[in-house]
Image (cartoon, grey):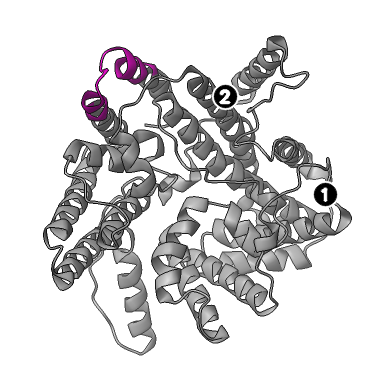
Amino acid sequence: MLFNSLEFLIFLPIVFLLYWFVFHKRQWQNLLVVVASYVFYGWWNWRFLILIVITSLSSYASGLLIERYAGCRQKQRWVNVANIVLNLGILGTFKYYNFFVENLAHLVGTLGYQLDCVTLQIILPVGISFYTFQALSYSIDVYQKRLPATHNAVEFFAYISFFPQLVAGPIERATHLLPQFQRQRHFDYALAVDGCRQMLWGFFKKLVIADHCAVVVNEYWDSYAQLPGTALILLAILFSIQIYCDFSGYSDIAIGCARLFGINLMRNFDNPYFSRSMPEFWRRWHISLIGWFRDYIYIPLGGNRGKKWKTIRNVYIVWTISGLWHGANWTFICWGLYHGTLLAICNLLGIHGKEQNSLSTKRLFPGFKAMGQMILTFALATIGWTIFRAESMPQAIDFFTALLTNRFYDPSMTRGVTIAASGFVLLFIEWLQRDKQHALQFTDSKPFNYPIVRWSIYYLLLLLIDKYSGDGQTFIYFQF
């Protein structure tokens, strides 16, 4: 079920009313969450529910077994490893089997041999990478004694399947989300209202900005070889705006929706396009995934401890896996290697971005130095997104070749310029609200302390959504 669908607009208020006005006890609310989440997820294809049930059962059982074998670390390790292998095996079969088999056959073919391989005609389950990582974090955290194993299956199934963030994150940790299902929740009017505001902002980003960017990007992408250099630059910028508004818009809707049910999800985007270095960018983009890779892969590998070459090795390992996590295509792997190289260079130059973790809220505009750093970081990210968007590496190379060799200017991209300008206006609004959780989180200062001002903004956004909504394109990250 899509957030931007009529079904969801009917589904959400029904679940909300049942949650608060029929099922008052925590146990029944959790059971409703599980049932509603399975309806939400099974709306695409009910067969996908089998996989999420297997993932939930295996991770739940592994937690209990790890607790049971508290006196034997070796048995605990085997239980944890078995759960990891099972879940990654399911993920690998559905997402990567054909990719590896086809590439193995191609490699053997280049050596002069013929390999008869069998590929699988299977559909990639929506959001499988997200809920698999969320389930793995639980068993790993129980194994590492970061939290006790839960004995309540309904609470655990609610943690894995919570519908607002089920198919595209944020990827929640059990240490943060599971305890919220283990305590009684009470309706908080202020929290619910703020959740509605954040959902409104997310819908605006997705339906008005991202979907309109998508129309231009999709229309002109296949004819990139004939477009002038300026049009290709604009095309790359439009996709950068599209993927941000699409993915952060989903996160805003998910976080706001969760607040309607008294659940707080972690922030997943923090003004990434105002970053002043690539390390800072990746502290602000898809925060939940980057944090997952940091805690469960990078740090266990040694992190930045030890010799410089080991740190760079760890960076490349993490970003190769990150690229592969996004999809079974060489474009994603090369995208990961591209960012791994940028971060390795930053590491060698001593650019860590830690001192840049906060954006100044005292100045309306950044200084010239900071502005230059932001433009450079945005340009580097945009190059990466172009590789990410390409269907193959030859296409990505052809795109950059055309950008450098085609004629430079053509006035035919006026519509694209207009849409890009609206995207930058949205980014500027988020810059003005950079000390808030989302752009519509107003303070009590003038003029926002007047209800007429706030409601005028809400109605304006609703009118823009109604008038300029795109053609209901699916969220980009659903494919991952």
Q: Is residue 173 above or below residue 305?
A: above
Mark 2 residue element: helix
Looking at the image, is 399 positioned above or below residue 113? above
Q: Residue at x 86, y 52 (%)?
A: 367
- Do tag 1 and tag 2 residues touch (Cβ < 8 Å)? no
Query: From the viewer's perspective, is residue 170 above or below residue 327?
Result: above
> Quick one: label 2, few (<14), some, or many (20+) residues within 10 Å?
many
Q: Is residue 463 magenta?
A: no
Q: Which mark is residue 366?
A: 1
Residue 94 in view of the camera: no
Would you say residue 16 is visible in this rendering?
yes
Please, what is the three-letter code of the amino acid marked with disc 1?
Pro
User: Disc 1 or 2, which lies upstream in sequence?
Assistant: 2
Q: Residue furthest right?
A: 368
Task: Indicate the position of residue 112 as horizontal and vertical percent values.
Answer: 34, 89
Tell me where residue 346 appears, x and y as whole percent.
66, 73
Q: Quadrant of the N terminus?
A: top left
Would you say residue 29 sits in the magenta stretch? yes
Dividing the picture into quarters, in which one does residue 80 lie?
bottom left
Q: Is 402 left or right of 156, judged from the image as shown? A: right
Magenta residues span 13-31
As drawn, the label of residue 197 is 2
User: Which is nearer the eye, 453 or 329?
Assistant: 453
Residue type (three-letter) at the residue carrying disc 2? Arg
Q: Nearer the viewer, residue 162 or 387?
A: 162
Nearer to the camera, 453 or 6: 453
351 relative to 61, above or below: below
Task: Report the Cα–Cα distance between label 1 and label 2.
Answer: 27 Å
What is the total number of numbered labels drawn onto the structure image? 2
